């Protein structure tokens, strides 16, 4: 919203550069998702040592991934932006953002994975505290460096990246100070992170966790292809979608929370050997996903058009934004159902191979080809193209609910030595 006052070029550049960063974040979510399946089940079984091994594995994966993305971003930021758009002005502004973003990957990846995994062991308050700290630092630093307040230089889009760097640094420090020095519940210490996981753990991870990483990686790549399709439909479409995405995230934040919680409590129930409770929770969470989907769609419908006045936009972009906002009303409803099922209940139950197949089939065989043909070859309007690019949400919602009710989605990790 702050960058919106500088026009569509910087807003579009920020949106597209963040799609690349979101691609990285999706990989992190894959690490978290795969590791959370094991951590929640081991915690439900009372096996702290296996939970610590899970953290060690996750940190190693996060560090390796972060270093890779950081190096690539430092070396070829212009080529990265050129993937998303052919407009040179947008590429130039995006490079300014990515040059600073390159320093964020390592501290964000490791801190983010660690804080999210603590939810699997009943430490959800850490994520809340860290998010509050990060949010406060981010908003203040963005205001200072984007607009050049309190004697700071006016950096505009680069200021947004610098603000994020400060926020992620604060987030990283708060997370590891708590985990390694304050927390007594899990008792994780540096020696546990240095110790290499056992061969049995690796076998379990690649059976239940690896499909999550593959699935989320393919989803992240697919999401980037969605942005590439929209990016080549013009700056007006990119800017309009950036505005809609802000509204979408504000209105669906509760859905993300429900999805994360669903995975954890389902994993705990499966780890404890209580299949009946897991099934009952899954059906309840399915009902809640419908409720939250309706509420989120209503919020987008009511408040979405109101946000347009915050930005400095051309008449063409305003029209495209209003049309896209109506498409998002439909999208967020099914987004709620499929998110709670795929990222929550079924994932927590260990049904990761099924979910990997669902993600591959529906996004890559249906959504992306249909949207690419419609938007880039047949020149359909942006709202129709977006509905095609997200039609996998509708298909996955129906397929995953059928899987839930069929009852074949519970798969336990091997070696669950239940205690107490």
Image (tube, grey):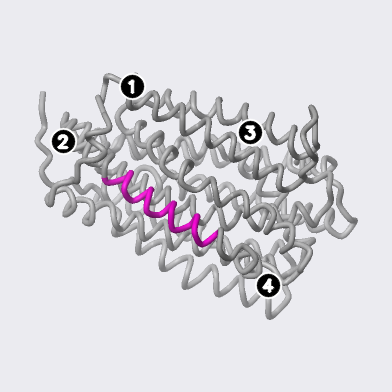
Q: CA distance from mark 1 to mark 2?
A: 32 Å
Upstream in the sequence, badge 2 or badge 4? 2
- On screen, residue 137 versus residue 31, left or right, reads right
Which of the labelled discs sits on residue 65, or is there none?
A: none
In the image, residue 390 above or below residue 62: below
Q: Residues within 10 Å of mark 1 (few under 14, many from 20)?
A: few
Q: CA distance from mark 4 to mark 1?
A: 52 Å
Residue to which mark 4 is pinned: 375
Residue to which mark 3 is pinned: 138
Q: Residue at x 68, y 80 (%)?
A: 377
In the image, residue 152 above or below residue 379: above
Upstream in the sequence, badge 1 or badge 2? 1
The N terminus: image quadrant: top right
Q: CA distance from mark 3 to mark 2?
A: 42 Å
Find out whether residue 332 is within the magenta segment. Answer: no
Tell me the element at label 1: helix
- Depth check, mark 3 against mark 2: the one in front is 3
Q: Position of residue 193 (x, y in %)?
A: 26, 38
Upstream in the sequence, badge 3 or badge 1? 3
Q: Residue at x 67, y 59 (%)?
A: 95
Q: Residue at x 66, y 58 (%)?
A: 16
Upstream in the sequence, badge 4 or badge 1? 1
Tell me the element at label 4: helix
Comparing 250 with 157, the one in front is 157
- The quarter holding residue 188 reads top left
Residue to which mark 1 is pinned: 181
Tell me the element at label 2: loop
Q: Give the extent of the magenta segment.
A: 57-73
Residue at the outermost bottom position: 377
Q: CA distance from mark 3 to mark 1?
A: 25 Å
Residue to which mark 2 is pinned: 273
């Amino acid at each position: 919203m702050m960058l919106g006052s500088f026009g569509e070029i910087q807003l579009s550049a920020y949106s597209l550069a963040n799609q690349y960063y979101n691609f990285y974040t999706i990989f992190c979510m894959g690490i978290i998702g795969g590791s959370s399946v094991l951590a929640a089940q081991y915690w439900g079984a009372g096996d702290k040592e296996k939970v610590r091994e899970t953290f060690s594995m996750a940190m190693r994966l996060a560090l390796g991934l972060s270093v890779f993305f950081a190096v690539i971003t430092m070396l070829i930021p212009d080529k990265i932006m050129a993937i998303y758009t052919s407009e040179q002005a947008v590429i130039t502004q995006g490079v300014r953002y990515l040059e600073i973003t390159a320093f964020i990957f390592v501290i964000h990846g490791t801190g983010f994975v660690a804080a999210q995994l603590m939810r699997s062991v009943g430490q959800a308050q850490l994520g809340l505290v860290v998010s509050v700290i990060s949010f406060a630092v981010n908003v203040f630093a963005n205001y200072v460096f984007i607009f050049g307040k309190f004697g700071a230089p006016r950096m505009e889009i680069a200021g947004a990246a610098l603000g994020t760097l400060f926020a992620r640094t604060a987030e990283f420090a708060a997370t590891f100070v708590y985990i390694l020095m304050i927390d007594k519940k899990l008792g994780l210490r540096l020696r546990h992170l240095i110790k290499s996981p056992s061969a049995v753990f690796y076998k379990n991870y690649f059976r239940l966790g690896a499909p999550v990483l593959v699935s989320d990686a393919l989803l992240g790549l697919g999401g980037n292809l969605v942005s590439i399709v929209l990016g080549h439909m013009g700056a007006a479409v990119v800017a309009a979608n950036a505005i809609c995405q802000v509204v979408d995230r504000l209105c669906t934040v509760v859905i993300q929370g429900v999805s994360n919680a669903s995975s954890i409590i389902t994993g705990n129930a499966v780890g404890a050997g209580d299949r009946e409770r897991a099934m009952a929770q899954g059906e309840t969470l399915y009902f809640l996903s419908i409720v939250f989907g309706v509420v989120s769609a209503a919020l987008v419908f009511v408040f979405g058009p109101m946000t347009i006045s915050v930005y400095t936009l051309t008449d063409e972009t305003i029209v495209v934004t209003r049309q896209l906002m109506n498409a998002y009303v439909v999208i967020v409803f099914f987004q709620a159902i499929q998110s709670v099922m795929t990222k929550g209940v079924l994932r927590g139950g260990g049904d990761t191979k099924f979910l990997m197949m669902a993600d591959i089939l529906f996004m890559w065989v249906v959504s992306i080809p249909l949207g690419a043909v419609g938007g880039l070859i047949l020149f359909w309007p942006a709202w129709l193209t977006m509905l095609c690019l997200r039609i996998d949400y509708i298909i996955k919602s129906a397929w995953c609910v059928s899987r839930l009710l069929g009852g074949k989605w519970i798969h336990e990790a091997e070696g669950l030595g239940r205690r107490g």
